[in-house]
Amino acid sequence: MDIVELKCFISVARTLSFSEAARRNYLSQSTVSRYIRDLEKEFGVTLFERTRREVSLTNEGKLLLPYAQEIIDTLNKATSVVSQLHNGSGGRLRLAYDSASADYPTKCLKTFIRKYPDIAVDMIKLSGAESSSALNSNDYDFFFMLRDMLPDNDNIESVITHKDKLKLIVPKGYKNRGGSVNGIDLKNERFALLSEAESPILYMEIMDIFRTFHFSPNSILQFDDVRSVYMAVAAGMGVSLLPENLIKTLTQPEVKGLDINGVETDLTFVLAWRKNNSNPAAHLFLDTVKKDSVEDDEEYVF
């Protein structure tokens, strides 16, 4: 017994016509008749009563029909699922991101899910330390992170997704000149920062700014999530430094962002993945990111 035989049996059972079953399966009528005879021989029963004028199912044929249909339906479903997985139009994608990546992961996902709605996506925020170790495992397909967080590992590929810059976050009533500040303005401030453990590279970049302005902050409050930083600034507990795009995503009327003059504040973000990732959905996601990334000329290799 094979699938073609079952399909022919179902066609004859539905149409009660060998010629119509042959037409639907692109076979000759004699071939369909042979397939039915082979099935009857295998089961040891008669499946159809045949006369010159009509064809009808026997009781055994009626009993077999729903099981034959179930077998074909299961095969069709399995074929579809396997094909979807192979082509990436089904399956699962696992994404990780850090606190500083702003809404870029959301931007990529919005485009991706619109094109591939059947792909399930798992997302998790990782601290800086977790990202470094997770990159060396197979737990996630992709990581959105600051470029300087990338480990020195030949098994890791990356592409620059976007660039950003640090801005000073201050309470709404903060006095400033022309929407920007300099080193003198910052020298005596208390700072509420995303913690070193949560985002070590971001923390290091901020410390470098302080060193460029030749001062060490009198007080630094550290928080493990961005919203807590915002709440602290809004409450007047201190000022902060955060990426501009993150500010635009989470900004509240109680706080505002100011440019920082006299120092380099640029940040570069990447999408990173392990080489030889065999997940078909990951290939499709990378293609989506490539269209919007700043490295349009870069070659991508899985």
Image (cartoon, helix red, strand yellow):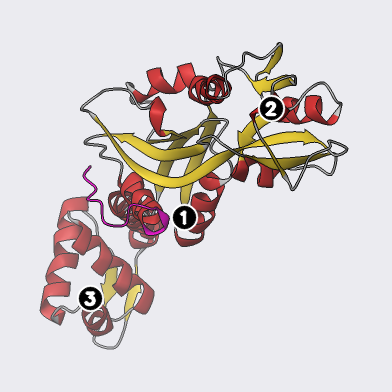
Q: Mark 3 or mark 1, which is nearer to you?
A: 1
Q: In the image, 28: left or right of 137?
A: left
Q: Is the magenta stretch mostly helix, strand or loop?
A: loop
Quadrant location of the N terminus in the rendered image = bottom left
Of helix, strand and loop, which one carries label 1?
Answer: helix
Q: Which of 151 and 73 is in front in this view?
A: 151
> Mark 2 packing: few (<14 Cα in 10 Å), some, or many (20+)?
few
Quarter-wise, where is residue 213 in the image? top right
Q: What residue type is labelled 3?
A: Asn
Q: Name the residue under label 3.
A: 25
> Mark 3 packing: few (<14 Cα in 10 Å), some, or many (20+)?
some
Cα separation, mark 3 vs mark 1, equals 38 Å
Q: Name the residue under label 2.
A: 184
Residue 190 shown in magenta: no
Q: In the image, 124: left or right of 239?
A: left
Q: In the image, 137: left or right of 40?
A: right
Q: Nearer the viewer, residue 49 or 287?
A: 287
Q: What residue type is labelled 1?
A: Phe
Residue 112, numbered circle: 1
Q: In this view, does 217 lie above or below 104?
A: above
The magenta stretch spans which residues? 291-302
> Which of disc 2 and disc 1 is earlier in sequence?
1
Give the x, y percent position of residue 33. 16, 73
Cα separation, mark 3 vs mark 2, equals 83 Å
Q: Which amino acid does label 2 sit on?
A: Ile
